């Protein structure tokens, strides 16, 4: 089995930002509560905090696995795994084999390399780059950016604010790439919207 390599550390950043926001917001009343001499919490509040903290930890773990180029996940399917780097320098993927030769073509069960070599495969896992399917971002005049994960992602700050005032972006539109990151960036964008609408903070 073979896979191409994607480099995307954005989900980790998004989850880490959400975790920092959560810990910062609840530092006084929960995480560092013992420093402030506040009254004890109820059992329900402790359970709520434990579940919320565990949820963040689980999603950070998922983001780390995705950032590890999905190779670790694919190892659970087969030990017969080769990463095709397609002419790019390959990241360290542990004891998984890497073939850096540029790929010329792919046919069912067969990969042909530019140097004339061939590799028979049972399955091919391809990380497909993302790109917007409509012109909404262009129509809104948003500044966009390209990354190894795709093209035309909205440029947004950590609270989802784009280059156009009062337009916020989150999720795949900003290159999130998975549900956990989409939720995290959506939550942060909601915070950004709230800051703008209620507190008048624009960035
Ligand atoms: C085949 C596949 C498998 C996946 N598997 C996983 C997985 O196992 N785990 C994981 O974490 N992630 C997975 N993902 C990625 C995950 O689905 C996305 O990262 C996530 O859904 C992004 O959420 P989002 O809200 O940003 O966008 P979306 O879920 O795509 O929602 C955007 C919505 O906006 C609507 N829309 C678009 N343009 C307009 C417009 N102009 N006006 C009005 N509405 C509009 C769309 O119809 C859509 O309903 C998978 C994705 C695909 C394609």
Image (cartoon, grey):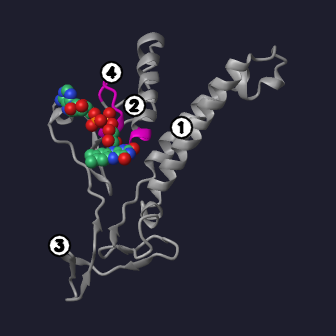
| Cβ–Cβ under 8 Å for marks 4 and 1 | no
Q: Which residues are magenta?
A: 164-181
Residue drawn at (55%, 43%) of the image: 58
Residue 140 position within the rendered picture, expressed as x and y whole percent measured from the top left:
20, 29
Q: Nearer the viewer, residue 137 or 7?
A: 7
Q: Is residue 5 above or below residue 15?
A: below
> Would residue 177 be counted in the magenta stretch?
yes
Whether residue 140 can be seen here: no
Mark 4 Cα-neighbour bin, 10 Å: few <14, some 14–19, many ≥20: few
Please tell me in which quadrant of the rendered image residue 40 appears: top right
Which of the numbered marks, if any, corresponds to residue 160? 2
Residue 182 position within the rendered picture, expressed as x and y whole percent measured from the top left:
39, 37
Which of the numbered marks, if any, corresponds to residue 166? 4
| Cβ–Cβ under 8 Å for marks 2 and 1 | no
Label 3 secondary element: loop
Label 2 secondary element: loop
Q: Nearer the viewer, residue 118 or 176?
A: 118
Residue 1 position within the rendered picture, expressed as x and y whole percent measured from the top left:
33, 73
Dot placed on the residue nearer the N-terminal end, 4 or 2: 2
Label 1 secondary element: helix
Dot placed on the residue nearer the N-terminal end, 3 or 2: 3
What residue is pinned by disc 3? 108
Mark 3 Cα-neighbour bin, 10 Å: few <14, some 14–19, many ≥20: few
What residue is pinned by disc 1? 17
Mark 1 Cα-neighbour bin, 10 Å: few <14, some 14–19, many ≥20: some
Dot placed on the residue nearer the N-terminal end, 3 or 1: 1
In space, the residues marked 3 and 4 are separated at their CA atoms by 48 Å
Closer to the eye: label 3 or 2? 3
Please tell me in which quadrant of the rendered image residue 132 appears: top left
């Amino acid at each position: 089995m073979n896979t191409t390599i994607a480099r995307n550390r954005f989900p980790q950043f998004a989850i880490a930002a959400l975790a920092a926001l959560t810990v910062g917001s609840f530092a006084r009343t929960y995480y560092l509560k013992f420093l402030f001499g506040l009254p004890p919490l109820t059992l329900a509040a402790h359970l709520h905090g434990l579940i919320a903290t565990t949820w963040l930890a689980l999603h950070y773990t998922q983001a780390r696995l995705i950032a590890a180029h999905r190779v670790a996940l694919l190892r659970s399917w087969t030990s017969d795994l080769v990463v095709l780097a397609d002419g790019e320098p390959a990241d360290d993927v542990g004891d998984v084999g890497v073939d850096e030769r540029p790929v010329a073509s792919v046919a069912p069960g067969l990969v042909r390399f530019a140097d004339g070599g061939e590799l028979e495969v049972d399955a091919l896992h391809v990380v497909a780059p993302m790109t917007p399917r409509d012109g909404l971002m262009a129509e809104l005049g948003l500044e966009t950016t390209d990354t190894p994960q795709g093209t035309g992602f909205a440029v947004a700050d950590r609270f989802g604010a784009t280059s156009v005032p009062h337009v916020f972006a989150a999720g795949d539109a900003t290159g999130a790439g998975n549900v956990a990151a989409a939720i995290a960036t959506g939550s942060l964008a909601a915070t950004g919207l709230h800051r703008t609408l209620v507190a008048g903070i624009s960035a």
